[in-house]
Image: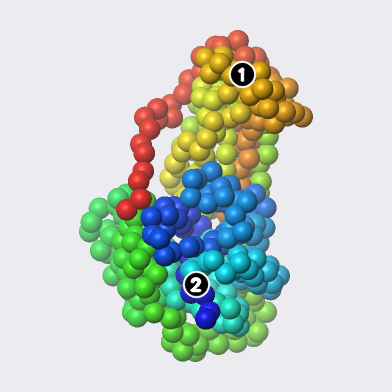
């Protein structure tokens, strides 16, 4: 029997990883459900895979977990990598349901055709996650998506609106995320605006990925016949115009990776967030540290005009430096061995972020972020215990699965 598959598709920063985390926590409480997970990222920096690895519900070492960074699984090379990942995750026969989280630049149709050819799996849910606030603020509550997509095709090109529209059009369930960040009338307006793009799919609002896993697992097999004509028309358009719907370059989407052991200056980072973050920066995420919170592994999680800071873990070097923990000689030696070869001042502390956006504005924002790193004088001040201005929120909220 083929293993049922659910795809989490949707644009960059819509909330796919949060939804996946919630599903994993729910699955841990269900005796007869054993999820396999494949995570795809556009960037070479495997942030989502690392985030999931820090949870208590799945480990990177699990045979049922695979990550595919650096490119879309809808692209030709990506489809081969996807097949290998599926074979690996399903190899021992224990998985009862497979969930695949795509990169935000993944186009549905090439992925759908690739899955249809895999006899060991059967697609059931193709969930399109859409950021309600981003549609409201950047796309006239979603009303400009269809017009923009049509205008692009008439001009012989593809654009961001085409990707957004088609991610919705191929779905059999549409999830409007971050509903807690918009008024109720805006949520209704967005739902009404995107409904004509796909009148056959349910539209469900959610916040923080709170969606019942059992309802998703119970979805019927995907109806390929409904989208066959649309997929064929898009394929023919590509052949005629020399386009390639599966490639991020078709939408002028590119990425950069920032890798530096130094901390960000909290005030300068705050200023960049408030002054440099334009519409063309779709997504930036990764791990970093601040001199004011040097024990914490922080997650930078930006989507469109909003940024979230999350505590992911504690740096190993801070454990070694904390004398109140009263580490035994054996524990101290073990910790020192793990830190062997790390930075002499910072230990395992580091900043690694991926930034994804429009080609035109990407490098300017990356340069602004790089200017936020602490200077030698500021690092000396941190070592001396001097204070820093830190406008970032200090309160912590804990989230629970449904």
191 sits left or right of 238 in the view: left
Mark 2: few, some, or many residues within 10 Å (few <14, many ≥20)?
many
* Observer-nearest of 145 and 89: 89
Q: Looking at the rendered structure, which numbered label has been put on residue 348? A: none
Residue at (44, 84) in percent of width and height: 223
Question: What is the spatial separation of the Cα atoms under label 2 and label 1, in whole angstroms?
Answer: 47 Å
Q: Colour scheme of this structure image?
A: rainbow
Mark found first going from the N terminus, 2 or 1:
2
Residue, far right? 341
Q: Quadrant of residue 193?
A: bottom left
Mark 2: which secondary structure?
A: strand
* Observer-nearest of 392 and 89: 89
Q: Quadrant of residue 143?
A: bottom left
Mark 1: few, some, or many residues within 10 Å (few <14, many ≥20)?
few
**Residue picked out by circle 2:** 5
Residue at (48, 74) in percent of width and height: 4
Q: Does 50 appear above or below 375?
A: below
Residue at (34, 55) in percent of width and height: 210
**Residue picked out by circle 1:** 328
């Amino acid at each position: 029997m083929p293993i049922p598959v659910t795809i989490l598709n949707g644009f960059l920063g819509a909330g796919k990883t949060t939804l996946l985390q919630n599903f994993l926590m729910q699955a841990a409480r269900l005796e007869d459900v054993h999820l396999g997970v494949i995570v795809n990222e556009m960037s070479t920096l495997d942030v989502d895979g690392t985030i999931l690895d820090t949870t208590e519900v799945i480990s990177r070492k699990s045979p049922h977990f695979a990550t595919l960074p650096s490119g879309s699984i809808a692209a030709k090379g990506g489809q081969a990598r996807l097949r290998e990942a599926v074979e690996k995750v399903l190899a021992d026969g224990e998985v009862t349901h497979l969930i695949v989280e795509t990169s935000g630049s993944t186009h549905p149709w090439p992925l759908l055709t690739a899955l249809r050819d895999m006899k060991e799996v059967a697609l059931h849910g193709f969930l399109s996650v859409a950021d309600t606030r981003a549609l409201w603020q950047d796309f006239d509550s979603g009303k400009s998506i269809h017009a923009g997509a049509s205008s692009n095709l008439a001009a012989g090109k593809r654009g961001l609106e085409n990707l957004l529209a088609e991610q919705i059009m191929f779905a059999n369930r549409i999830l409007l995320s971050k509903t807690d960040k918009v008024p109720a009338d805006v949520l209704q307006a967005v739902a009404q605006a995107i409904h004509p793009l796909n009148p056959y799919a349910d539209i469900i609002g959610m916040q923080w990925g709170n969606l019942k896993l059992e309802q998703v697992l119970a979805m019927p097999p995907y109806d390929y016949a409904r989208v066959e004509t649309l997929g064929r028309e898009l394929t023919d358009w590509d052949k005629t115009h020399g386009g390639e719907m599966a490639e991020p370059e078709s939408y002028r989407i590119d990425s950069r990776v920032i890798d530096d052991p130094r901390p960000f200056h909290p005030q300068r980072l705050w200023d960049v967030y408030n002054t440099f973050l334009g519409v063309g920066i779709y997504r930036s995420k990764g791990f970093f540290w601040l001199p004011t919170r040097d024990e914490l592994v922080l997650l930078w999680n930006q989507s469109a005009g909003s940024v979230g800071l999350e505590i992911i873990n504690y740096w190993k070097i801070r454990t070694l430096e904390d004398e109140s923990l009263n580490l035994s000689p054996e524990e101290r030696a073990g910790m020192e061995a793990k830190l062997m070869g790390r930075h002499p001042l910072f230990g395992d502390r580091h900043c690694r972020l991926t930034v994804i956006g429009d080609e035109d504005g990407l490098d300017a924002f990356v340069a602004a972020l790089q200017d936020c790193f602490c200077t030698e004088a500021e690092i000396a001040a941190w070592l001396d215990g001097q204070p820093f201005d830190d406008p970032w929120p200090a309160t912590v909220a804990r989230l629970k699965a449904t």
